[in-house]
Image (cartoon, grey):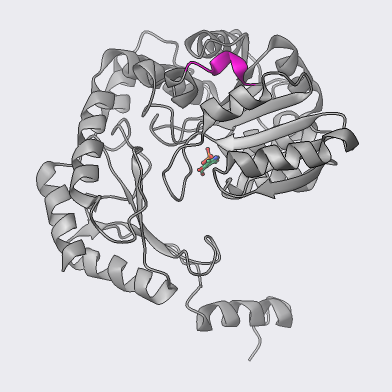
Amino acid sequence: MADKHIPNHLFKALIEREQKGMLRKLTSNYPTIDFCSNDYLGFSKIGLLSKKLETSSLKQETIYGSTGSRLISGNSVFVEEAEKQIALFHHAESALIFNSGYDANLGLLSSIPQKEDLILFDELVHASIHDGMRLGLAKNFKFKHNDVEALKDLVQRHQKDFKNIYIVVESVYSMDGDTAPLLEITEFIKPFENIFLIVDEAHAIGVFGNQGRGLCNALGIEKKCFARVYTYGKAMGCHGSAIVGSEVLRKYLINFSRSFIYTTALPNHSISAILNAYQLLIETDQKDILQNNISYFYSKTSGIKNMIKSQSAIHSLVVDSNEKADLLEKKLGTKNMYAKAIKSPTVKEGAERLRFCVHAYNTKEEIDLLIEQLHN
Ligand SMILES: Cc1ncc(COP(=O)(O)O)c(C=O)c1O
């Protein structure tokens, strides 16, 4: 029977999803051993950021809301100063804060590439990049995951038909945890004046590079990127994001990026959290502790069949059906461990997996316990 509160065909779509074992559901009852959250450094969950904020000399706003969009009443000297510090940290001319990584990608991809331009994107880029492209006017083609030859081939075939080409990749892929071949890509685009590289560093900030500056920093290619996206909801343990690049890019986004313009700005206590998270990157050794745990996890799991090779905090075991992914998640749950079943349609059919996020606060005993379960 159809639900009265929703048109019939939408109700059917839900039933169909449920029947295929694909229904998404919210839960708040998480097992306590965390191999799931994006809080790689523990800034949020082990209270490092809240403790830091208690004693922070950085201004804490007493008003709760920012009261408007950045272009109306939501701007402040504080946020502009924060953007200058972010730019400096990431060795860029400018930074512009967005309310989330989703908003940043939406605003960037929908406003920069124009009708006469082409976007070439890795087939595994995040949904926010897809949504940004859908809102924009440029044509787009995907290339096979991490396949630089496929990318070169697309450039060679289409270059003459387009004014500019934007290449979009993630430095660390959120589902596979592997890293983009950024050195090869930057080497390839060097001779072209009209090819621009956009790198989403969502899962690389805090994990790679000097003091967690990201993978572009680790590889020495920060200046070779047209735009880089840093998000603060993952290793930084708070919320929001920034697009870093040239001063003129910032000016353009302020003028044309709709997800920046038409939304209430982050309040200053969020900006304060972001700045304090950057200080934690500099002051603590959480990144080294995380890297030790990643190496330990990697050494213990590299022999497991269908484990995707990764040097990042994200590791995935492909189990190739929603049912098997659910079963494994439940099995780990009985040992009080939480790793997330990532099912189709979030990943394509056949690529269903259990995704493990390694954290600085995971103990060796927890990692051993997890691996024991995977071998059983
Ligand atoms: C690669 C990537 N980009 C962007 C986002 C969106 O960031 P946010 O959660 O801040 O909206 C995510 C995660 O959600 C992501 O994995």
- Whole-percent x and y of residue 81? 56, 8
In the displayed image of the protein, which residue is found farthest to the left?
365
Q: Camera-side residue: 265 or 145?
A: 145
Residue that appears at 64% across and 23% down: 227
Whether residue 85 is visible here, answered yes or no, is yes
Q: Camera-side residue: 236 or 64?
A: 236
- Tell me, yes or no, whether the highlighted magenta stretch contains residue 62: no
- Residue 145 drawn above or below residue 246: below
- Tell me, yes or no, whether the highlighted magenta stretch contains residue 224: yes
Q: Camera-side residue: 125 or 193?
A: 193
Q: In which quarter of the image is residue 51?
A: top left
Q: In which quarter of the image is residue 319?
A: bottom left
Q: In this view, does 16 lie to the left or right of 140?
A: left
- Residue 184 drawn above or below residue 57: below
Residue that appears at 56% across and 48% down: 145
- Whole-percent x and y of residue 129? 65, 43
Q: Camera-side residue: 149 or 304?
A: 149
Residue that appears at 12% across and 51% down: 368
Quadrant, the N terminus: bottom right
Quadrant, the C terminus: bottom left
Q: In which quarter of the image is residue 267?
A: top right
- Residue 5 drawn above or below residue 357: below
Whether residue 112 is visible here, answered yes or no, is no
- Whole-percent x and y of residue 172? 46, 38
Region of the chain picked out in magenta, as a range: 220-225
- Whole-percent x and y of residue 294? 25, 38
